[in-house]
Amino acid sequence: MTRAEFLLAMRVGALAQLVLGCGWLGLSPGVRKESIMTDHDRRNAEAARRLYQREMDVLSPDIVWHVPGHNPVSGTYHGLKEYAEIMTGRMAPLDRRDFDVNHVMVNGEYVVATVHFVGDRRGKHIDMNGAHILRVRDGKIIEGWGFASDQNALDDFFSA
């Protein structure tokens, strides 16, 4: 684990503990602790997994999505149209977009997912870890926040 990955893990873990009232579960891929999750928790974790499989029906029509940083994609998007058209349009063109979910943690209506992103855009390459905090209600993602292990690199990538 690099220093940047460690710092990201600590930030996400601390944020999860402060905001969600839960600790860093540290569940590795393939390790299941289903007994600690309620049915409600499992449904919310599944909503997050479906988002990463690009199933748009898991998003609330009134979704609010927060993109950090100082680049053309940064900002807050309100509603499906802004999320699906404006935000993704500002990301374009993506010549490569590989997105892997590493860990999913859940507590009530909040889900934290640590992710790994590899992309190519206008001659720029990015390979980094990040995280999303998702708020889920009635099986729909109603709000999301993004985090990058190297926000300056992500700003440079989307500013190209």
Image (cartoon, rainbow, N blue to C red):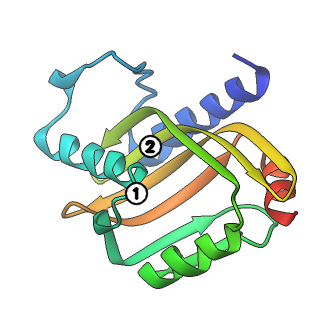
Where, quadrant-wise, is the C terminus in this rendering? bottom right
**40 displayed left or right of 109:** left
Q: Which residue is mark 1?
A: 54
Tag nearer the camera, 2 or 1: 1
Helix, strand, or loop for circle 1? loop
Question: Residue at point 26% right, 45% down?
Answer: 46
Q: Residue at x 67, y 74 (%)?
A: 75
Q: Is residue 10 left or right of residue 25?
A: right
Question: Which amino acid, by three-letter code, is at mark 1?
Answer: Arg
The reply to whether callout 2 and callout 1 are in contact (CB within 8 Å) is no
**Distance CA(mark 2)–CA(mark 1):** 17 Å
Image position of 44 (left or right of 28): left
Image vertical order of residue 48 relative to residue 68, above or below = above
Instruction: Look at the picture and state if 64 lies above or below 53.
Output: below
Q: Amino acid at mark 2?
A: Val
Residue at the disc numbered 2: 112
Q: Nearer the viewer, residue 138 or 55?
A: 55
49 is higher (above) or lower (below) than 9: below
Where is residue 25, by image quadrant? top left
2 or 1: tag closer to the N-terminus: 1
Front residue of 120 and 37:
120
Q: Position of residue 149 (x, y in %)?
A: 72, 39
**Quarter of the image where one finds residue 103:** top left
Q: Residue furthest front?
A: 95
Is the N terminus in the top left, top right, bottom left or bottom right quadrant?
Answer: top right
Quarter assignment of residue 156: bottom right
Residue 58: horizontal and vertical position, in percent? 29, 63
From the top left corner, tell me how far across and down residue 122 is, in percent: 84, 59
Q: Residues within 10 Å of mark 2 (few under 14, many from 20)?
A: many
Assign a secondary structure to mark 2.
strand
